[in-house]
Image (tube, rainbow, N blue to C red):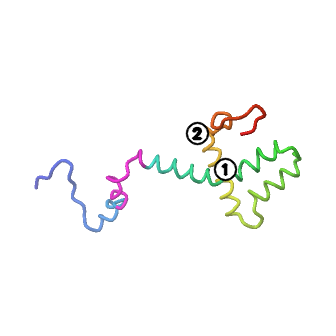
Amino acid sequence: MMMPANYSVIAENEMTYVNGGALIDCFAPIMNEGNWKTFNTNLIKIVGNYSMTKFLSSTVGVLFGGNFSFSNWGDTLEGNYYVKDNAFDTVANVLGGLAAIYTLGTGDAKTLHTDKVLGVKGAL
């Protein structure tokens, strides 16, 4: 019996091993590699935007807030990032902080002097 070069005869009980991943193939025409990259980047930026206020207030806000001390900083980090007896929240908060860092690193921040008109005394 003659078969095409790219054809192989496989027993029915072996089809389980070669038919895996068929569900992933359903999305192939809809989402290509570029779409998945955009989806992942946008998801990280959404999480980063959500965590941005907490991240900035816990780091830059404490450092430049005028009353910096290591105990003050530790208390702020413990309240915002480290959650006692809840490892999942702690990990989620740290991942949110990392997403905020990624978001800050991939886009331009709006600045007051270029986005608003300031008066001589610095008031809007």
Residue at image point 59% right, 54% down: 47
Number of marks: 2
Q: Position of residue 97 (x, y in %)?
A: 67, 50
Q: Amino acid at mark 1?
A: Met
101, 23: nearer the viewer: 101
Kindly indicate whether the residue at mark 1 contacts the one at mark 2 (C-beta within 8 angstroms). Answer: no
The quarter of the picture where residue 105 lies is top right
User: Picture coordinates of residue 63 (x, y %)?
Assistant: 81, 43
Q: Secondary structure at mark 2?
A: loop
Residue 71 placement, left or right of 84: right
**Reading the chain from its start, which is encountered first: label 2 or label 1?**
1
Q: Which mark is residue 122?
A: none
Describe residue 30's horizontal placement relative to residue 95 as left or right.
left
Label 1: which secondary element: helix
Q: Residue at x 78, y 46 (%)?
A: 61
Kind of residue at badge 2: Gly
The residue beneath circle 1 is 52
Q: Where residue 15 sits: x, y (%)?
A: 29, 64
| Residue 98 horizontal side relative to residue 33, left or right | right
Query: Dividing the image into 4 quarters, which one contains the N terminus?
Result: bottom left
The stretch of residues the image draws in magenta is 23-35
Q: Is residue 86 within the magenta segment?
A: no
x 76%, y 35%: residue: 122
* Rendered position, 25 above or below 63: below
User: Camera-side residue: 110 or 37?
Assistant: 110
Q: Quadrant of the C terminus?
A: top right
Cα distance, mark 2 to mark 1?
A: 13 Å
Q: Which residue is mark 2?
A: 107
